[in-house]
Amino acid sequence: MKYCPKCHSEYQDSATICADCQTPLVNYVPFCKKCDGDIGERDIFCPHCGVLLPERIPDENDVPECEDHP
């Protein structure tokens, strides 16, 4: 299954825009800017050189708050 590069929501192959965050979905193979290695859709570190991929970390405003539990 494919995931939005911005909000990491799952989407169907036929989608062109993320239903949750409205990010355009394009078909490309993401790569590491440091080592040119290919990276997975949900990686936040390059599996080849270990560099942090900051563009993959969700924005703190996009992360839902925890609910209080009794």
Image (spheres, rainbow, N blue to C red):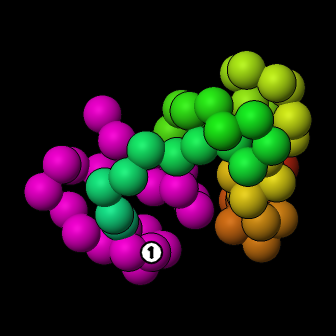
Q: In this view, does 53 lie above or below 39?
A: below
Specify whether 54 is left or right of 40.
right
In the picture of the structure, the residue carrying the numbered disc 1 is 23
Is residue 62 visible to us here?
A: yes
Amino acid type, mark 1: Thr
The answer to whether residue 15 is magenta is yes
Residue at coordinates 24% horizontally, 69% vertically from top-left? Answer: 16
Residue 64 spot, x, y in % from top left: 70, 59
28 and 21: which is toward the camera: 28
Asked which quadrant contains residue 63, the reply is bottom right
Q: Give the range drawn in magenta.
A: 1-24
Image location (x, y in percent) of residue 19 = 33, 70
Magenta stretch prevailing secondary structure: loop
Please identify the quarter of the rendering in which residue 7 is found.
Answer: bottom right
Residue ranking furthest to the left: 14
Q: Is mark 1 on a helix, strand or loop?
A: loop
Task: Tell me the crowding category of disc 1: few under 14, some 14 to 19, or many 20 or more residues within 10 angstroms, Cα based.
Answer: some
Rendering quarter of residue 48: top right
**23 or 70: which is nearer to us?**
23
| Residue occupying image coordinates x 52% and y 46% | 30
Which quarter of the figure is the N terminus placed in?
A: top left
Q: Which residue does the image show at 83% across and 65% down from the upper left? A: 60
Please tell me whether residue 2 belongs to the stretch shown in magenta.
yes
